[in-house]
Image (cartoon, rainbow, N blue to C red):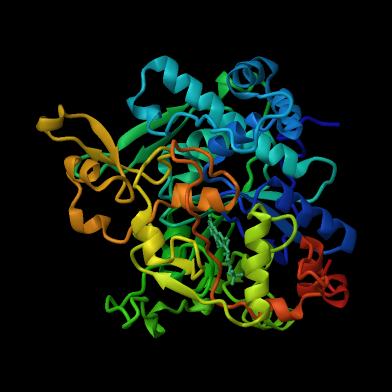
């Protein structure tokens, strides 16, 4: 078998009709992405399984502490020397108590603030984590696999993209920002040349240059395949801007009902219940997107055969779907949470609200209103703020009082710490620690002294997909059920 990441450099994968959207943290892990790709092959449908690229080192070390042998196998395929280093530090063999407090990896900020040895260790961990996730998602089939990144989480882009390419990732999909630097990174890695990324630093005159030389990991002479690069955008203006300046292979046009983060509304007034109000100005002109001559997909409430037909009538190549996959058996959401959510959907008693404040990224974020979760004010207020994962931090220029240089802060961290770092108190209002809350909902919650962290859950606003699925008596269904429902055979058979 050819080595992953080096296969058929010139052949682009077949264009998917259905993209399973990337869902962090840990909701679209390798198991879900693989199940989608395998279902596509079994059903003869063109589908793309996508792993979330957010928080991968946290999940890698957590799984190793649970003795996960899939991860061990994938790590060994990466680089036996680096695998040994990582396993020596984190692997726990044999049974361990379920409530064992887990070690965390260093925060991504050490890539800037750490000494050379720490930077090197963190880089290896992040490259390895992305390799493992893609390698496992691609194992045993030949369907395409993508990775999803949030542009705002800039610190991790270089190592995560390298690890993903080393494992042969077919698509890179980036949202939550303007990812105009990503195509050059992909091109440089494909030539096995150093890549760089200019990271935003609040309050600084210039950006911070991050660099990574792939030759530390990829032997000379080995050529990595450049994956297709898709921009996730809400508006045609961003698609046009990116297409005019860099090499982009297509667009996922995501509307405000989609799960996860959404683009801010153009009108700044909020509804009485605090939700942003989207209007005509927020709607993309799809004719303008089509004029760019690249394929595009529609996302947000498109999980049905009727909706995919509508999308195609508008010129789309297909659709991207999140929520329907988030609740299927192979998703990484905790089983007990999935069960509760499915029951509530079946009884039509689940509400999703767009919060303008919850996400430290300051993008609107869809929050499932669920008892016992951080959507409840009392749970929110009783949580002691901590920041021990640090994937959504923002770089800032430290002032003289702090000794200068670059620091990292997050409006979801303890308020005094944030204010000491020059952040404004007002910015911390209502912010939720998404690293810990989403991680806990995916089963990565045993990372604090005080035990499990409270959860937060996100889903899209349109839950109508559930009625159309062939659910089992207990309400469960598989990724293949979703694919089969959205792409009935007659649809997929009609395409080449
Ligand atoms: C649980 C969940 C997590 C998500 N996380 C991300 C993410 O990390 N990055 C991203 O680009 N989109 C994310 N999304 C959006 C999905 O990829 C997809 O575009 C969206 O859910 C489509 O709308 P739908 O939920 O109506 O199908 C998330 C969606 C859900 C439901």
328 relative position to 234: left or right = right
Q: Number of labelled discs?
A: 0
Question: Looking at the figure, which quarter contains the C terminus?
Answer: bottom right
Give the answer, above or below, for where 486 lies relative to 128.
Answer: below
Dividing the picture into quarters, in which one does residue 201 lie? top left
In percent of width and height, residue 82 lies at 62, 18
Task: Report the side of 152 relative to 405 (left or right).
Answer: right
- Using the rendered image of the protein, determine whether residue 311 is visible from the camera's viewpoint: yes
User: Which residue is depicted at the point 65% across and 14% down?
Assistant: 81
Residue situated in front as seen by the camera: 241 or 127 = 127
Where the N terminus falls, by quadrant?
top right
Rendered position, 8 above or below 43 = above
Residue 244 position, x and y percent, is 44, 59
Quadrant in the rendering for residue 4? top right
Q: In this view, does 207 lie to the left or right of 40?
A: left
Q: Position of residue 5 (x, y in %)?
A: 71, 35
Question: Quarter containing ligand 1?
Answer: bottom right
Query: Is residue 320 among the parts visible in the rendering?
Result: no
Q: Out of 261 and 287, give the one closest to the viewer.
A: 261
333 vs 66: above or below = below
Residue drawn at 80 percent across, 72 percent down = 471
Q: Residue 138 at x, y = what percent?
A: 76, 43
Which residue is found at the position 81% from the left and 63% from the top? 480
| Residue at the (19%, 45%) spot, across then down | 419
């Amino acid at each position: 078998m050819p080595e992953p990441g080096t296969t058929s450099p010139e052949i682009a994968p077949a264009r998917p009709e259905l993209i399973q959207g990337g869902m962090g943290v840990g909701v679209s892990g390798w198991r879900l992405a693989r199940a989608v790709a395998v279902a596509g092959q079994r059903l003869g449908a063109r589908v793309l399984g996508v792993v979330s690229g957010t928080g991968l080192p946290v999940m890698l070390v957590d799984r190793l502490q649970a003795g996960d042998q899939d991860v061990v196998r994938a790590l060994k395929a990466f680089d036996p020397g680096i695998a040994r280093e990582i396993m020596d530090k984190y692997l726990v063999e044999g049974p361990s108590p379920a409530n064992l407090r887990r070690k965390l990896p260093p925060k991504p900020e050490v890539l800037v603030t750490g000494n050379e040895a720490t930077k090197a260790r963190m880089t290896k961990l992040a490259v390895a984590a992305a390799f493992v996730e893609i390698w496992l998602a691609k194992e045993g089939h030949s369907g395409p696999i993508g990775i999803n990144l949030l542009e705002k989480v800039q610190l991790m882009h270089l190592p995560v993209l390298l690890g993903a390419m080393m494992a042969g990732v077919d698509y890179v999909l980036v949202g939550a920002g303007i990812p105009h630097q990503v195509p050059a990174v992909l091109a440089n890695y494909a030539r096995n040349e150093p890549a760089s990324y200019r990271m935003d630093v609040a309050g600084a005159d210039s950006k911070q240059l991050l660099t990574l030389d792939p030759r530390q990991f990829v032997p000379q002479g080995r050529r990595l395949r450049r994956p297709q690069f898709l921009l996730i955008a809400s508006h045609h203006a961003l698609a046009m801007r990116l297409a005019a300046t860099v090499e982009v292979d297509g667009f996922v046009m995501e509307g405000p009902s989609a799960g996860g983060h959404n683009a801010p509304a153009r009108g700044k007034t909020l509804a009485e219940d605090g939700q942003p109000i989207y209007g005509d100005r927020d709607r993309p002109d799809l004719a303008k997107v089509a004029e760019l001559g690249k394929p595009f997909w529609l996302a947000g409430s498109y999980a049905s055969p009727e909706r995919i037909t509508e999308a195609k009538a508008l010129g789309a190549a297909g659709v991207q779907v999140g929520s329907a996959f988030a609740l299927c058996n192979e998703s990484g959401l905790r089983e007990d949470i999935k069960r509760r959510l499915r029951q509530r959907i079946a009884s039509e008693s689940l509400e999703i609200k767009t919060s303008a404040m919850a996400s430290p990224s300051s993008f609107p974020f869809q929050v499932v209103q669920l008892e016992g979760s951080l959507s409840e004010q009392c749970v929110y207020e009783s949580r002691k703020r901590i920041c021990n994962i640090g994937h959504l931090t923002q770089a800032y220029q430290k002032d003289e009082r702090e000794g200068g240089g670059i620091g990292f802060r997050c409006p979801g961290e303890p308020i005094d710490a944030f204010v000491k770092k020059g952040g404004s108190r007002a910015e911390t209002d209502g912010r939720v620690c998404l690293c810990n809350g989403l991680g806990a909902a995916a089963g990565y919650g045993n990372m604090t002294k005080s035990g499990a962290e409270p959860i937060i859950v996100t889903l899209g606003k349109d839950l109508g997909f559930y009625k159309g699925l062939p659910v089992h008596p207990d309400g469960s269904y598989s990724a293949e059920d979703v694919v089969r429902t959205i792409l009935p055979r007659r649809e997929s058979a009609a395409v080449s």
